[in-house]
Image (cartoon, rainbow, N blue to C red):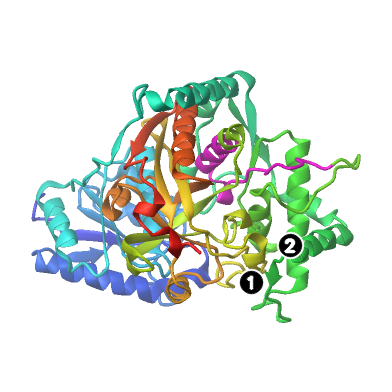
Amino acid sequence: MSDDHHIVLVASGDSRLAANRVCWPAQAALEAAVTRCFADLGRTVVRGHPVDPAKGHGFIDGQARGIEIFRRIDPEAPLVVAEAVWQYTSHVLPGLTRHRGPILTLANWSGQWPGLVGLLNLNGSLTKAGIRYSTIWSEDFTDTFARDAIAEWLRTGTIRHDRSHAKPFTDDTMGRAFKADRERGAALGAALVRDQALLGVFDEGCMGMYNAIIPDHLLHAMGLFKERLSQSALYAAMRQVPEAVARNHYDWLRAHGMRFVLGSEEATELTEAQVLEGLRMYDAAVCMAHEFGCSAIGIQYQQGLKDVCVASDLAEGLLNNPERPPVFGRDGAELFAGRAVTHFNEVDECAGVDGLITDRVWRDLGIDPSNTLHDVRWGEAVRECGVDEFVWLFEISGAAPASHFIGGYGGATGERQPPMYFPRGGSTLKGVSKPGEIVWSRIYVERDALHMDIGRGGVVRLSDAETARRWHATTPQWPIMHAVLYGVSRDQLMAKHQANHIQVAYAESAEQATRALVRKASMARATGITVNLCGTPEDSLEQHQPREQWA
């Protein structure tokens, strides 16, 4: 890379002014650390856009603003996209599609706002768009790992990461022992292609997540079609749900042990009225899924509905659980009786396809099909409760099913969504994920084709004090999962993962989880998805935490 160019730095932010203002100090600290790192390596960093004193932040906060800024940036200059926050990739994607110089995406290793989630969304979106980039992450950019990587980028324009944990899933994968599961998964995939199914999409494209939109022709090839629905129709349907119905759902949850942390101040506290409105959304969503014949649905919420009603997360967590308040149709029959109504949070269509496949495979095996996406939020090494390794913190804004929690509904609480993101409030579905075996995965788009990375992991149980510390380092109102990914290091996942989201589902034993993985991978492959097997899928949780620590 030529020494003639300064390093141009840009920062994509939120579309919400309150979030950008609150998060700006963390971004400013990241940029200062990155500037020092480059200076130590003999290069100067210049911002590609000024801090706006009237707005109180220096983020690119809209797509039009991003286009305007990139018109003034030398398209040959080495470019850094620095993220300490959740960001809307759409703000910078138009400019990045035309940038010819080397691109480096980077984030601080922190769960606070969080930059890691924004970075992974950006990377997955660039991969889908076919834009070449390199990526790196660090707590403060003084460590050898990050500095050596940046030095490599300055020399060559690229950074090479270890991705040896991911290998193609083939007919020979897992040997003869899992031949029957491969064949059964392939049969399930052939049935989906033959019989077809619908994904109910309540307004496409949430929070700039370009990577979360699957082109129609890729879905059609695997037998899936989008039923394009409107969030305004969902809101209208919510308003037709009688209060008595919402109260029945509320009473059901409380009878099953769920506790709501209620107050009286609408602007900052969860109120009973907010809970009931969220349960109206739940009822309306089940009815619309039934009416339109959808096998899975995804609600965008964050833009649009956030301005008129409470958060969708309580509804979403209920939908993803076969055990949930019953919803009845016009004829009095229970809808989706004994079944989850698979929901893909933030209308992430890649998660929707994954959730649909998971639901069919898990039910075929006769095990609980409850599954959810989480943000790949953050993680640290842990040395307690028999654990001595890196433990991820997966977290989502309330949409995880209570069946994943210690104590189920009895271990779940509803708390008010943070006002910074959710001005009209609404209840979360909060809990600590139970120890056990999981299958994790992610579907993504690369080179106009669908791919899946899939692996095994375990959820460890940490002390109450450590869980509280991790919650307060992130978002304490949201459900949390302490996860170990078998045979996949922190940096391998960061280098390879193509999304801010990761899909997780439980199994009852390590052997059952491995069988489910093989069936799921085989089903996906039979629909035309290219599958990578990640890590060491035949590990067990007992190799990572003694069983006596699970209680």
Instruction: Quote the CA–CA distance across marks 2 and 1.
Output: 20 Å
61 relative position to 493: left or right? right
Question: CB under 8 Å between callouts 2 and 1?
Answer: no
Q: Which residues are magenta?
A: 334-359
- Quadrant assignment, res 160: top left
Give the class, few, some or many, for how many residues have Cα within 10 Å of label 2's Cα (few <14, many ≥20): some
Q: Which residue is mark 2?
A: 256
Q: Is residue 259 above or below residue 243?
A: below
Q: Secondary structure at mark 1?
A: loop
Sequence-earlier tag: 2 or 1: 2
Measuring from the top left, give residue 262's x and y in whole percent. Answer: 71, 77
Q: Is residue 263 above or below residue 504?
A: below
Image coordinates for residue 6, horizontal then vertical, percent:
16, 60
**Where is 80 relative to 141, above or below?**
above
Mark 1 surroundings: few (<14), some (14-19) or many (≥20) residues within 10 A: many
The label nearer to you, 2 versus 1, is 2
- Nearer-the-camera pick, 353 or 511: 511
Asked if residue 523 lies in the magenta stretch, the reply is no
Type of amino acid under label 1:
Arg
Residue in the picture at 14% in, 63% down:
144
Residue that numbered label 1 is attached to: 416
Q: Secondary structure at mark 2?
A: loop
